[in-house]
Amino acid sequence: MTTDELVVEINGPVAVATFNRPAARNAMTWAMYDGLVEFCERVDDDPEVRVAVLRGAGGRAFVAGTDIRQFLEFRGAADGIGYEQRIERVIGRLERVGTPTVAVVEGYATGGGLSIAAACDLRICTPDAKFGLPIARTVGNCVSMSTYARLVALLGQSRTLHLIYTAGFVDGAEAARVGLASELVPADALYARVGELCAQLASHAPLTMRASKVALRRLREHSLPPDEDLISMCYGSEDFREGVDAFVAKRPPRWKAR
C-alpha cells in the first residue's frame, strides 16, 4: 500500500493517505490513482478505522491535477472517454468509502485534485488554498458529468461556470464563504484542528454518518445524464492535442475550436 508517491498511515481509528510528489505539486500518476482505490478498500476492510484523511505532501499543494505528460499517450476521443471513466471509478470509489472522509487542503487543489477534494465529505483548508479547474486555459478538456454534479452541489451552477470559464482560483477564505470548504483554519493550527476533528468524528455514531452521506449522494446522483458526447468532443479535438503539447512545452495554446 505505502509507496514513494502515496504514503498510507493508520493510527488507531484514523487512516491517512498522503499524496507524495511535492516537486510536481502532487500531480497524480496512474499508479497514484490505483493506490487511492487500494486505500479506500483498506479503510473499508478495517473495522477499527472511523475516519479517512487525504492530504498533500510539502504544503504547496493538495493535488495539482493529473500529470499532464500522461496525456501525450492519447490518440483520440476513445482515450478521453476511457480516461474519464477510469478517473470516475476512482473518485466514485472514494465517495463511497463508508467512513467520513476529510480532505486537508494546503495550496493547490486543481483539476483532478479538485475532483478528489469534492468527493470527500469535508474539506479543511488554509487561507493559501487555491481551488480551481483551469482546463479552459490549459489543455482544453472537460470532466465527467458526475464531477460537474459534485461541483454544482457544492458551489451552485453560476459559481461552477464562473470557475471554469475564468480558469481562475478560489482561495481558502472564499471557499469557506461559498461552501466549497467546510472549514478555514490558520496554517499554524491546521493539523491540531484536523486531529481534533478526527477525534470528534471517531466518537460519533458511524451508522448515522454513513446513512447521511449515502442519502446526500443519492440525491445528487439521481438521473445523471450521459456525457460521452461531450468528452468525445473535447478529447477528440485538435484543441486538446494542442493544449497538451503547449502545456508540456510551457507555451500558450493556440485554440481553433475544432
Image (cartoon, rainbow, N blue to C red):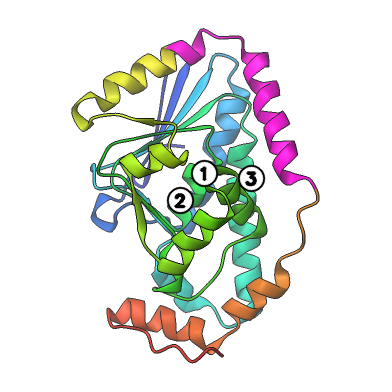
Residue at image mark 3: 92
Q: Is residue 125 left or right of residue 121?
A: left
- The one nearer the camera, 201 or 7, is 201
Image depth: mark 1 or mark 3 in front: 1
The range drawn in magenta is: 200-222
Q: How crowded is mark 1: few (under 14 residues within 10 Å), some or many (20 or more)?
A: many
Q: Which of marks 1 and 3 is nearer the N terminus?
A: 3
Q: Is the magenta stretch mostly helix, strand or loop?
A: helix
The residue located at (23%, 55%) in the rendering is: 23
Image depth: mark 3 or mark 2 in front: 2
Residue 134, above or below 53: below
Q: Is residue 3 visible?
A: no
Percent position of residue 231, x then y: 64, 72
* C-beta proximity under 8 Å, tags 2 and 1: yes
Residue 118: give its label.
1
* C-beta proximity under 8 Å, tags 3 and 2: no
Task: Check disc 2 and give the amino acid type.
Answer: Leu
Task: Check disc 1 and give the amino acid type.
Answer: Ala
The residue located at (61%, 9%) in the rendering is: 205
Where residue 82 sits, quadrant-wise, is bottom right
Task: Check disc 3 and give the amino acid type.
Answer: Gly
Residue at image mark 2: 114
Looking at the rendered structure, the secondary structure element under dot 2 is helix
- The one nearer the camera, 198 or 174, is 174
Residue 50 lies within the magenta run: no
